[in-house]
Image (tube, rainbow, N blue to C red):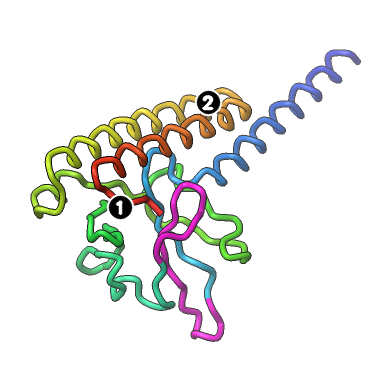
Amino acid sequence: MLPLTTHILSALALLLTILTTSVQATNDICPGYNYAVWHGPPQPSRNGARQFGVVNHNCDASATCPPGNPCTCSSFSCTPNPATINGFINHENLWFVCREDVRMGQCWFFNHVPGYAIEKCCRNDGKKNKERGLINDEQFEAINATNTLLDRHIEEYASALKKRAGDVVLVRERQKREMRDAEMREMAVGLGKWS
Protein backbone atom coordinates (compact mmCIF):
# COMPACT_ATOMS: atom_id res chain seq x y z
CA MET A 1 0.00 0.00 0.00
CA LEU A 2 2.86 2.35 0.73
CA PRO A 3 4.19 2.32 -2.84
CA LEU A 4 0.75 3.25 -4.22
CA THR A 5 0.46 6.15 -1.76
CA THR A 6 3.96 7.28 -2.68
CA HIS A 7 3.11 7.19 -6.39
CA ILE A 8 -0.10 9.15 -5.85
CA LEU A 9 1.69 11.79 -3.76
CA SER A 10 4.47 12.03 -6.35
CA ALA A 11 1.92 12.43 -9.13
CA LEU A 12 0.08 15.14 -7.18
CA ALA A 13 3.33 16.98 -6.48
CA LEU A 14 4.25 16.82 -10.17
CA LEU A 15 0.79 18.05 -11.20
CA LEU A 16 0.98 20.93 -8.72
CA THR A 17 4.42 21.90 -10.04
CA ILE A 18 3.18 21.83 -13.64
CA LEU A 19 0.08 23.88 -12.82
CA THR A 20 2.03 26.42 -10.79
CA THR A 21 4.62 26.75 -13.54
CA SER A 22 1.89 27.11 -16.17
CA VAL A 23 0.12 29.86 -14.20
CA GLN A 24 3.40 31.65 -13.64
CA ALA A 25 4.37 31.27 -17.27
CA THR A 26 1.12 32.79 -18.52
CA ASN A 27 1.46 35.74 -16.17
CA ASP A 28 4.99 36.49 -17.37
CA ILE A 29 4.62 38.66 -20.42
CA CYS A 30 7.21 38.11 -23.17
CA PRO A 31 10.35 37.34 -21.16
CA GLY A 32 13.28 38.67 -23.19
CA TYR A 33 11.40 41.55 -24.82
CA ASN A 34 10.62 45.21 -24.09
CA TYR A 35 6.92 45.13 -25.00
CA ALA A 36 4.01 42.89 -25.92
CA VAL A 37 1.15 43.51 -28.36
CA TRP A 38 -2.21 42.44 -26.91
CA HIS A 39 -5.71 42.05 -28.22
CA GLY A 40 -8.77 42.27 -26.05
CA PRO A 41 -11.85 40.11 -26.07
CA PRO A 42 -14.37 40.67 -28.90
CA GLN A 43 -16.59 43.67 -28.26
CA PRO A 44 -20.24 42.87 -29.08
CA SER A 45 -21.07 46.58 -29.28
CA ARG A 46 -18.50 46.86 -32.09
CA ASN A 47 -19.63 43.82 -34.13
CA GLY A 48 -17.06 41.63 -32.41
CA ALA A 49 -14.11 43.89 -33.20
CA ARG A 50 -11.13 43.60 -30.89
CA GLN A 51 -9.06 46.36 -29.41
CA PHE A 52 -5.27 46.18 -29.73
CA GLY A 53 -2.53 47.79 -27.74
CA VAL A 54 0.95 47.52 -26.30
CA VAL A 55 2.00 46.70 -22.73
CA ASN A 56 5.28 46.34 -20.91
CA HIS A 57 6.34 43.21 -19.01
CA ASN A 58 3.94 44.09 -16.15
CA CYS A 59 0.89 44.54 -18.42
CA ASP A 60 1.08 48.31 -17.96
CA ALA A 61 -0.37 50.08 -21.01
CA SER A 62 2.01 51.87 -23.32
CA ALA A 63 -0.22 52.41 -26.35
CA THR A 64 -3.77 51.52 -27.36
CA CYS A 65 -5.62 51.58 -30.65
CA PRO A 66 -9.35 51.84 -31.30
CA PRO A 67 -11.23 48.56 -31.82
CA GLY A 68 -10.94 47.21 -35.33
CA ASN A 69 -8.08 46.59 -37.73
CA PRO A 70 -4.76 47.06 -35.89
CA CYS A 71 -2.98 47.67 -39.19
CA THR A 72 -4.78 51.02 -39.53
CA CYS A 73 -3.40 52.17 -36.17
CA SER A 74 -0.39 54.49 -36.33
CA SER A 75 1.32 52.56 -33.50
CA PHE A 76 1.69 49.38 -35.56
CA SER A 77 3.24 48.27 -38.81
CA CYS A 78 1.99 45.17 -40.57
CA THR A 79 3.08 42.70 -43.20
CA PRO A 80 1.33 42.57 -46.58
CA ASN A 81 -1.63 40.19 -46.93
CA PRO A 82 -2.31 38.21 -44.94
CA ALA A 83 -1.69 41.18 -42.68
CA THR A 84 -0.12 40.57 -39.30
CA ILE A 85 1.54 42.97 -36.88
CA ASN A 86 5.32 42.97 -37.34
CA GLY A 87 6.31 46.18 -35.59
CA PHE A 88 5.44 48.74 -32.96
CA ILE A 89 6.38 52.41 -33.18
CA ASN A 90 6.64 54.01 -29.75
CA HIS A 91 5.99 57.60 -28.66
CA GLU A 92 9.56 58.56 -29.70
CA ASN A 93 8.96 57.16 -33.20
CA LEU A 94 11.41 54.31 -32.48
CA TRP A 95 10.86 50.98 -34.20
CA PHE A 96 10.36 47.78 -32.20
CA VAL A 97 10.31 44.56 -34.21
CA CYS A 98 7.47 42.24 -33.12
CA ARG A 99 7.22 38.48 -33.47
CA GLU A 100 5.51 35.49 -31.95
CA ASP A 101 7.23 33.67 -29.10
CA VAL A 102 6.28 30.43 -27.36
CA ARG A 103 6.33 32.26 -24.01
CA MET A 104 4.14 35.24 -24.91
CA GLY A 105 1.90 34.87 -21.85
CA GLN A 106 -1.36 36.68 -21.21
CA CYS A 107 -2.49 39.77 -19.36
CA TRP A 108 -5.10 38.13 -17.15
CA PHE A 109 -6.55 41.46 -16.05
CA PHE A 110 -5.95 44.60 -18.04
CA ASN A 111 -8.03 47.68 -17.30
CA HIS A 112 -9.94 45.40 -14.87
CA VAL A 113 -11.17 43.18 -17.72
CA PRO A 114 -9.96 39.56 -17.98
CA GLY A 115 -8.70 37.70 -21.02
CA TYR A 116 -6.25 39.93 -22.89
CA ALA A 117 -4.18 37.65 -25.12
CA ILE A 118 -0.66 38.51 -26.20
CA GLU A 119 -0.19 38.42 -29.98
CA LYS A 120 3.45 39.38 -30.39
CA CYS A 121 6.55 40.18 -28.36
CA CYS A 122 8.48 43.31 -29.35
CA ARG A 123 12.09 44.41 -28.99
CA ASN A 124 13.86 47.65 -29.89
CA ASP A 125 15.53 47.32 -33.29
CA GLY A 126 18.56 49.51 -32.65
CA LYS A 127 20.03 48.84 -36.09
CA LYS A 128 16.90 50.01 -37.93
CA ASN A 129 16.54 53.05 -35.66
CA LYS A 130 20.21 53.97 -36.27
CA GLU A 131 19.78 53.58 -40.04
CA ARG A 132 16.73 55.86 -39.88
CA GLY A 133 18.82 58.49 -38.05
CA LEU A 134 16.60 58.34 -34.96
CA ILE A 135 19.35 57.47 -32.46
CA ASN A 136 23.01 58.34 -31.98
CA ASP A 137 25.94 55.95 -31.41
CA GLU A 138 25.65 56.09 -27.62
CA GLN A 139 21.93 55.28 -27.76
CA PHE A 140 22.61 52.47 -30.25
CA GLU A 141 25.12 50.92 -27.83
CA ALA A 142 22.67 51.22 -24.93
CA ILE A 143 19.96 49.45 -26.97
CA ASN A 144 22.41 46.71 -27.97
CA ALA A 145 23.39 46.22 -24.32
CA THR A 146 19.71 45.90 -23.40
CA ASN A 147 19.10 43.42 -26.22
CA THR A 148 22.08 41.32 -25.08
CA LEU A 149 20.54 41.28 -21.60
CA LEU A 150 17.16 40.31 -23.07
CA ASP A 151 18.78 37.44 -25.03
CA ARG A 152 20.12 36.12 -21.72
CA HIS A 153 16.67 36.52 -20.17
CA ILE A 154 15.14 34.25 -22.83
CA GLU A 155 17.66 31.50 -22.04
CA GLU A 156 17.34 31.89 -18.26
CA TYR A 157 13.56 31.82 -18.37
CA ALA A 158 13.52 28.67 -20.52
CA SER A 159 15.93 27.01 -18.11
CA ALA A 160 13.86 28.02 -15.08
CA LEU A 161 10.71 26.59 -16.66
CA LYS A 162 12.44 23.21 -16.93
CA LYS A 163 13.24 23.25 -13.22
CA ARG A 164 10.46 24.22 -10.83
CA ALA A 165 7.91 26.97 -10.33
CA GLY A 166 9.79 28.75 -7.55
CA ASP A 167 12.75 29.19 -9.89
CA VAL A 168 10.54 30.89 -12.48
CA VAL A 169 9.27 33.41 -9.94
CA LEU A 170 12.75 34.24 -8.67
CA VAL A 171 14.22 34.46 -12.16
CA ARG A 172 11.47 36.81 -13.39
CA GLU A 173 11.75 39.03 -10.32
CA ARG A 174 15.49 39.42 -10.93
CA GLN A 175 14.98 39.93 -14.66
CA LYS A 176 12.44 42.67 -14.06
CA ARG A 177 14.92 44.45 -11.78
CA GLU A 178 17.57 44.14 -14.48
CA MET A 179 15.13 45.51 -17.05
CA ARG A 180 14.45 48.54 -14.84
CA ASP A 181 18.22 49.11 -14.61
CA ALA A 182 18.57 48.78 -18.39
CA GLU A 183 15.72 51.25 -18.88
CA MET A 184 17.51 53.71 -16.59
CA ARG A 185 20.74 53.30 -18.60
CA GLU A 186 18.83 54.01 -21.80
CA MET A 187 17.17 57.04 -20.25
CA ALA A 188 20.61 58.31 -19.16
CA VAL A 189 21.63 58.55 -22.84
CA GLY A 190 18.45 60.36 -23.87
CA LEU A 191 16.08 57.52 -24.72
CA GLY A 192 12.58 57.60 -23.27
CA LYS A 193 10.87 55.56 -20.61
CA TRP A 194 9.55 52.18 -21.81
CA SER A 195 5.97 52.73 -20.68
Residue 59 locus on image (x, y percent): 51, 53
Nearest the viewer among 94 and 2 is: 94
Say few, some or many: other residues with alpha carbon within 10 Å of mark 1 (under 14 / 14 to 19 / 20 or more): many
| Mark 2 residue type | Lys
User: Which residue in the protein does label 2 denote?
Assistant: 162
Q: Quadrant of the C terminus?
A: bottom left
Magenta segment range?
43-63
Quadrant hosting residue 103? top left
Say few, some or many: other residues with alpha carbon within 10 Å of mark 2 (under 14 / 14 to 19 / 20 or more): few
| Residue 184 in magenta stretch | no
| Residue 57 in magenta stretch | yes
**SS category of the residue bearing label 2:** helix
Q: Earlier in the sequence, mark 2 or mark 1?
A: 1
| Mark 1 residue type | Cys
The answer to whether residue 99 is above or below residue 54 is above
Residue 186 locus on image (x, y percent): 29, 41
